[in-house]
Amino acid sequence: MGKILGISIKNYGCLKNIRMGQLYSDRQADPLGNMVAIIGPSGNGKSTLADAFGFIADCISTDVESACDANNRGGYDQIVSQGSKDPIEFELYYKETSNSRPITYELTIAKDKTGRPYVQKERLRQRKANNKNGRPLSFLNLQEGKGYVFEGKDGGENEDGTVEGNKVEVSLNETRRLGIVALGAMKQYSRIEQFLSFLRSWYLCYFSPDAARQTQTAAPTAHLNRIGSNLNNVAQYMFRENASEFKKILSEIQSKIPNIDRIEPEKMPNGQMVLQFFQDGFKEPFYSPRMSDGTLKLFAYYLLLHEKDPRRLVFIEEPENGLYHQYLSALAGEMSKSVGTGYTKQLFVTTHSPFFVNALQPEQVWVLKKEADGFSTAKRASDYDLVDEMIEAGAQMGDLWYSKYFG
Ligand SMILES: Nc1ncnc2c1ncn2[C@@H]1O[C@H](COP(=O)(O)OP(=O)(O)O)[C@@H](O)[C@H]1O
Ligand SMILES: [Mg+2]
């Protein structure tokens, strides 16, 4: 469970200072919903935003220095906002369930004297249980790897230094790794463990139809990987977990993929799973290597929406690429429906497609705009004049965008 209510990013490429949704310092703002679509002209920071999420995920799975170098980022100096002397900062405002107390996570990454990136500051805050309006207490606070952490589910240090609960002084011997990763591995820090498990479940999707066409050796896998090259293995996993449910899922997906009559899994003698796509007008099935990019993509996205034990935060860049425009509104509608309003799934999508956006509501759409100084700002479509009124009068979001009411 869990979702982010808001995020603030500082000094990450063209995102020198952006805020989206609700943060502790801006509690009046509306929280992010479960479906967040990000639009804006090319070069306005959509991919940078997706990459900021990817960067945080990489910091967790490796360390901050490796994250700076990974995925073509080119190192700290390339990532940090040009001309800025300040470090890279992230702030996440997170909530586990509807009645949990929100958690604020702050992370600052800077360069040390030798020029290597390291974790300069890390802090977790949460207000005390049964204290609706109190100020949050820090239950992890590290500077240069040194500081304190609190055991258990409650407690922390007040700003005036008073302490509630079990405070433990810590000194990490490694400042390139996140403190939440080191400490979240220990049972006594259950709040950190829970938050970390949320961050670990993020999925950045860069689906590549060519990768999905490659033959995979049998290896049932619960989740699609970054490029979708294990599509058949995920199908194999779902089939193994519950064959009849998987067949139901396939028939539901098939009803959403135009010109596909049926999709059937077939297990080969060597254990591999292949998917057979039966197309209108043909008797024999086609296998995934012969399917069109668009069909494979639609199939992968719909399969993603049906994942058992879904990733709690998914980020997809430009799902419309390679898809016929008429399919996009239905896809966006299904995505919105699948994430619902609870705390199990949150989906971020960047898009250039008014057709996709047509299925969305004003508060689900965010506009990234490049200002005169070269850095981007983020604004909710519902905060533009007339948008809400036009929607109430029956207009659709994509049409308003196309007609320049926003974006
Ligand atoms: N270190 C940096 N500081 C400031 N701007 C940067 C930095 N690195 C890249 N940029 C700029 O950020 C923008 C990145 O755009 P991008 O996120 O790819 O946009 P989109 O996905 O919306 O097309 C480009 O205009 C690029 O010049
Ligand atoms: Mg882009």
Image: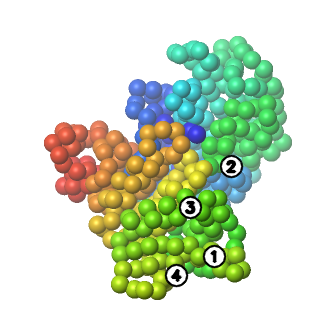
Q: Residue furthest front?
A: 244
Q: Which residue is mark 1?
A: 267
Residue 258, numbered circle: none
User: SS class of the residue under badge 3?
Assistant: helix
- Tell me the quarter of the picture where residue 322 sits: bottom left
Give the residue displayed 62% in from the left and 43% down from the top. Answer: 198
Quick check: marks 1 and 3 in contact, CB under 8 Å? no
Specify whether 296 is left or right of 155: left
Give the residue displayed 66% in from the left and 76% down from the top. Answer: 272
Q: Earlier in the sequence, mark 2 or mark 3?
A: 2
Residue 287, numbered circle: 4
Quick check: marks 1 and 4 in contact, CB under 8 Å? no
Residue 60, numbered circle: 2
Quick check: marks 2 and 1 in contact, CB under 8 Å? no
Q: Residue furthest left?
A: 393
Packing grade of label 3 (10 A; few <14, some 14-19, many >=20) is few
Specify whether 395 is left or right of 12: left
- Disc 1 Cβ-to-ligand 2 distance below 8 Å: no
Determine the CA span between mark 1 and mark 4. 12 Å
In this orientation, does residue 128 appear? yes
Residue 244, numbered circle: 3
